[in-house]
Image (spheres, helix red, strand yellow):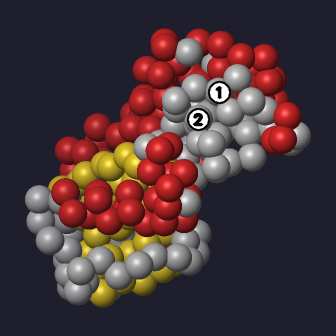
Amino acid sequence: MLEPFYKLNSFEAGTDEAGRGCLAGPVTAAALILPEGFSNDVLNDSKQLSHIKRNLLRPIIEKDCSCFAVAHIYPQEIDKINILNASILAMHKAIEQLTETPQFIIVDGNRFKPYKNVLHECIIKGDGKYMSIAGASVLAKTYRDAYMEKLHDEYPMYNWKKNKGYPTKEHREAIREFGITKYHRKSFRLLPEQLQLKL
């Protein structure tokens, strides 16, 4: 069972990102603040939930949380500032869009940069420990998946509706055959023999 809050009696936001290891598409972050008394027996780290469960949870989280926000950082920016900085920037942008200002931030993982003057705590595997981070992980994943499914219509040969831009064998074979798109991250190792890839 996940804990509702890291710090009791603190107006606390949880944040997480999705798509960090992808070859294409944005890195997407969500942030949310939960009300006192929030509970959900199904909510867990998004990686532990099926696609169906995540999509069922998304409107419940959105309805029951105090506020939430989602932000994308796109490949051109990822290539400029690197994926770690892009992931943190996405989380900052999500927090910035919250309609209420948190007094404390809990972050999934072990790397973060201070957001304004709000105290924060990095929690390894936090999406499997705290409800607000788990909720943020579900929102980030479902919003990013929906975005990649739209991109699939533009470039169906990469099958992004299935692989969501992750480095599957099928995705890499499509890159080998068709080259790359404006949605690919050029700073990533898109193929094992990167030098042979025409950028």
Q: Nearer the viewer, residue 49 or 179?
A: 179
Label 2 element class: loop
Residue tagged 2: 184
The residue that appears at 71% across and 17% down in the rendered structure is 178
Labelled pair 1, 2 in contact (Cβ < 8 Å): yes
Residue type for callout 1: Ile
Residue found at x 43% / y 72%: 107
Left or right for 189, reference 30: right
Q: Which mark is residue 100?
A: none
Which residue was labeled with disc 1?
180
Kindly indicate the quadrant of the structure image that contains residue 125: bottom right
At horizontal 56% and vertical 22% (from top left) the residue drawn is 161
Image: 153 above or below 90: above
What residue is shown at x 64% (from left), y 49% (from top)?
187
Is residue 73 at least partly visible in the picture? yes
**Label 1, label 2: how far apart the Cα atoms are:** 6 Å
